[in-house]
Every structure is written in structure tokens, then in C-alpha cells.
Image (cartoon, rainbow, N blue to C red):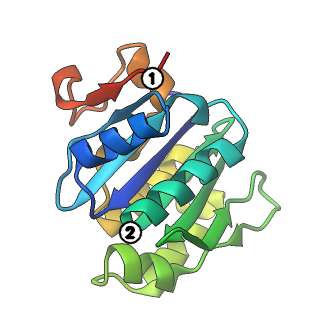
Amino acid sequence: MGTIYANITLKGPQAQDILQELGNQGKSAFVSPTEDGLTTVYEMDSDEGEPSILTDLAEDLSGYFGCPALAVKTVDEEQFCYWLYSDGELVDTYKSANDDKGKSLGGKPELLAQLFNTDVTSEEISEILHCPDQDCGFSLAVDRHLSLVELLGLPMCSVGFGFCDLDSGEYPEDLEDEDLLRIDVD
């Protein structure tokens, strides 16, 4: 797994439709299979580029498909960030603390529950988002992301992987090369 990765999980649209829209936007990307209405997008410039590349794409896709989109990014294995969109509107942001003394910023657990899994409580989500790293065993940003994905029932393939990982032939345990859709724009 990479130390830096970024991806977007969409709820609603099908993988093939997302791939087509990415092509319309001139983006190079991988798209996971759609399972339980959830699909993950790994766009080429999002991993190592400015967060605005990732967030602009999440906003565009969320607006185009009229759906929730959760854009995530880890930075230097220490910080986990997300941007939550609904129908093209930014409704929440979150940034974990990147040291033992800092506090995490943002995070509206009720919105994550409402948009992705109404069976979990805001308190359960808040515990993951705001628990200090040392108290919760989150030694890496990916650990916090994994816990959130498990709780919300999001695709496991969204944890620890971005475009660069997939492009180099490194795949999540639950996916193989032939499972992924890919579009390359010159």
C-alpha cells in the first residue's frame, strides 16, 4: 500500500457510467466494479497533486450524477482527510490530527451516516474520527480510514490505494486487474 493515496467513492451511479463521464472530462482513471451501489474512482492526478484536483473532480461527479461522493486523501502516512459532497455541494470536510497533541478538524458524523449508512450511529463515527491516534491504535492514517470504511460498509478497495498503486500493478486484495475499468486520455 502506498503512503500517499487519493480516491473518490460514489454512491449510486454504475461503474461504466462513471468511466464514460471521466472520459468526457478528459481524465485518466481506474474505476472499481460497482458493489451495493458503491463505486471507487482512482484518478491519475489526484494522488500526488493538490487536493483541489481531487475535490474538484468529486464535486463534478457528485453534481453530474446527483449523488453522494466521499473524496479521501492520506498525506505522509500521518494524516487522513476527506471531503463529502452531496448533489455537487460540499457538505463536510475532515482532517485528522497529524501529531499526538493536535486535534482533528471537522467531521460531521451525522452526514456520513445519513449519506452512506443509516445503520450506524453518529457516536460510532465520531469515535473513529476524533479518537486520538495513540488511544485508538491509529499509528497510520490508513488505519483510521480502514476503520471508517469498515463501519460505513464502504468498498475495501478504497483503503490504501490510489491511481499510482494500481498503475504500477499493485491491487487491493478484493480486486484484480481484470475487475477494474480503465480510461487513459492522451
Furthest residue in direction front, as rendered: 24
Residue 101 occupies quadrant: bottom right
Dot 2: what SS? loop
Nearer to me, 81 or 66 = 66
When the figure is inspected, residue 184 is found, relative to residue 69, above or below; the finding is above
The image's mark for residue 64 is none
When the figure is inspected, residue 165 is found, relative to residue 13, above or below; the finding is above
Left or right of 182? Residue 128 is right
Tell me residue 89's x, y (percent). Answer: 57, 72
Residue at image point 42% right, 13% down? 168
User: Would you say residue 4 is visible in this rendering?
Assistant: no
Distance from disc 2 to disc 1, alpha carbons, whole Å, reads: 26 Å
Residue at image point 39% right, 70% down? 66
Which quarter of the rendering shows the N terminus?
top left
Furthest residue in direction right, as rendered: 101
Tell me residue 63's x, y (percent). Answer: 48, 65
Nearer to me, 99 or 80 = 80
When the figure is inspected, residue 160 is found, relative to residue 8, above or below; the finding is above
Left or right of 185? Residue 97 is right
Left or right of 47? Residue 13 is left
Q: Residues within 10 Å of mark 2 (few under 14, many from 20)?
A: some
Residue 50 occupies quadrant: top right
Dot 1: what SS? helix
Q: Which residue is mark 2?
A: 67
Q: Which residue is mark 1?
A: 165
